Amino acid sequence: MARLELVRSDYGYPLTFTIKDAQENVVDLTNATVQLKIKKPGTIGFIVNAQCDIDADPTTGICTYNVAQGAFSAVGRYSGELEITWSGSKVMTATDLYIDIVPDLTSGA
C-alpha cells in the first residue's frame, strides 16, 4: 500500500490514503468506517488506533487521518493497516503500510 517517512513529533497534518483491492480497483467506502492501526513490529500495543475521515464521495476510496499530537513521538520503523468495516458486518483489511519515523534536525535524536 505505502511506505511513509515522517518526522518525529510533527502533528496536525493529514495522511491521506486511497484504498484499493487486490486487483487495484478503488474500494467503495459507502456505509463503512475506516480504522488506522499502527504499531512497532513485535510489540503488543498500537501507537495509533484511530478512525479516519472518509471523503465526501465515499466511492473514491479516499480516507484521511489527521496526525494527532504525540502520535509519532519515537523514532523507529512501524507497520500499519487500514481496517474497513461496512454496516453489514463485512470487514476488509488493507495491509502493507510501513512508516519510518525519523528524528528532526533540531534534536538530532
Image (tube, helix red, strand yellow):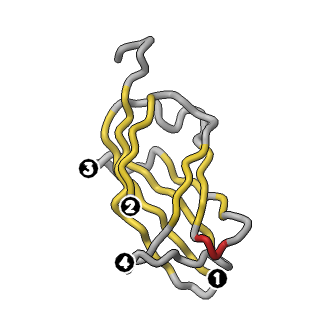
Closer-to-camera residue (67/71)? 67
User: Which of the numbered marks, if any, corresponds to residue 1?
Assistant: 2
Residue 63 place in picture, x, y as percent:
60, 61
Identify the residue at image location x=32%, y=35%: 76
Image quarter in which the C terminus is found? top left
The residues bearing labels 1 and 4 have C-alpha atoms spaced at a distance of: 22 Å
Question: Marks 4 and 1: in contact by CB < 8 Å?
Answer: no
Q: Residue at x 57, y 54 (%)?
A: 50
**Quick one: quadrant of the N terminus?**
bottom left
Quadrant of the rendered structure where residue 107 is? top left
Q: Earlier in the sequence, mark 2 or mark 4?
A: 2
Of marks 3 and 1, the one in the foreground: 1
The relative height of residue 92 versus residue 3 in the rendered view (above or below) is below
Quarter location, residue 59: bottom right
Work out how far the residue at label 1 is from the one at label 2, CA to CA, in angstroms: 24 Å
Q: Are marks 1 and 2 in contact (CB under 8 Å)?
A: no
Which of the two labelled residues, at mark 3 and mark 1, occupies the earlier sequence position? 3
The amino acid type of the residue labelled 3 equals Gly
User: Which numbered disc covers residue 22?
Assistant: 4
Q: Gap between marks 4 and 3, in whole Å?
A: 26 Å
Where residue 55 appears, as percent x and y from the top left, is 68, 63
User: Rounded to the nearest whole Å, what is the CA distance between mark 2 and mark 4?
Assistant: 10 Å
Q: Which residue is mark 1?
A: 87
Amino acid type, residue under disc 1 in the picture: Ser
Label 3: few (<14), some or many (≥20) within 10 Å? few
